[in-house]
Image: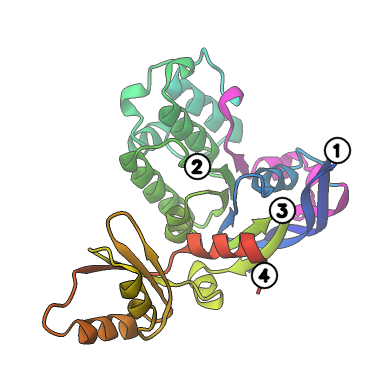
Amino acid sequence: MSVVASLDDVSVAFGVTRALRGVDLSIEAGAVFGVIGVNGAGKTTLLRVLQGLIAPDTGRVELLGCDARRLGSAQRAVLGAQLDRGGLPPNARVREVLVFLRALYGRGHDPDALLDELGLRDAARRLVRDLSTGQHRRLAVAGALVGQPRLIVLDEPSLGLDPLGTRALWQTLHRIASEGATLLLTTNDMDEAEALCHEVAVLREGAVVARGAPTALLERHGALHRIELDTTVDDAGCAGLSRLDAVVEVHREPRHTLLLSRDAVATIRALVTRAACRPPRFRWLPPRLEDVVERLQAHGEG
């Protein structure tokens, strides 16, 4: 696959704050690539650098084979970016915005189909300034998609959306990716990262501390299974549970007891055997990408 975007030893500072520190990253054509990390990790700065909106202090940034700071009309014509709240004309109507953006590209998706797909049909004739936060976010994403660009840059696309809006957005992004577009997105929603991304990079204080497919990161960084018992226990009970096979930690919560385990099957088998006649009610939750990010924020790579 060809590389559509890359950063080579890129650093950016705002005064004494180092937003990016020696970032090396490459994104292949056709991928859905996610950038994750806590707030302030440098995610939005990375997107702005890649689009040529911020010049790096050190390093080189290439987008579609060109220096990101010197993109020509040919490169701009195949780049779609989500606009923030101030980037959309407040007195324009929703459908008019998409029709105008599509005309700029000279090609693209049917605006009405996108409005339907993203649940904006009823808002098509409303003014942008009158949209709710979630509607505005969906319109901003639609604006990035409507010109059918090869590379689409999205900054927290599902922020502020309700569950139905989020599901509709994910379905649309899956479709766009299946048609061959490359998507680069930031997100604080680890479910979104796992649902959409072929690969993610974890940022910590402006540096990439891990990169890979979500499933690979879960395996590599030893994310733990969570087993929630529908009961609380005393200190002696906690001590006994901590000795079960593969249990790493035991936590007493207000309404349940939480076991963190390296091997859920081994722990559940030991739990049932220990309980003999009355196995406890429990809920098993598989490892989460959120746990990997939390661990990397605390300890870095490895």
Residue reaching furthest to the right: 58
Location of residue 6 with respect to 17 vertically, above or below = below
Q: Nearer the viewer, residue 108 or 228?
A: 228
Q: Mark 3 points at which residue?
A: 205
Lower position in the chain sequence, tag 2 or tag 3: 2
- Looking at the rendered structure, the secondary structure element under dot 4 is loop
Name the residue type under label 3: Glu
Location of residue 239 with respect to 126 vertically, above or below = below
- Looking at the rendered structure, the secondary structure element under dot 3 is loop
Q: Mark 4 points at which residue?
A: 301
Q: Name the spot of residue 293 as percent of width and height, x first.
A: 56, 61
Residue reaching furthest to the top: 91
In the image, what residue occupies the spot 41% across and 23% down?
132
Lower position in the chain sequence, tag 1 or tag 2: 1
Q: How crowded is mark 3: few (under 14 residues within 10 Å), some or many (20 or more)?
A: many
Res. 86 image quadrant: top right
Q: Distance between the residues labelled 3 and 4?
A: 12 Å
For residue 259, side relative to residue 158 (left or right): left
Q: Name the residue under label 2.
A: 157
Location of residue 179 with respect to 165 vertically, above or below = below
Lower position in the chain sequence, tag 3 or tag 1: 1
Q: Give the range drawn in magenta.
A: 57-86
* Quarter the C terminus occupies: bottom right
Is 74 magenta? The answer is yes
For residue 296, side relative to residue 119 (left or right): right
Q: Mark 1 points at which residue?
A: 15
Colouring method of the image: rainbow
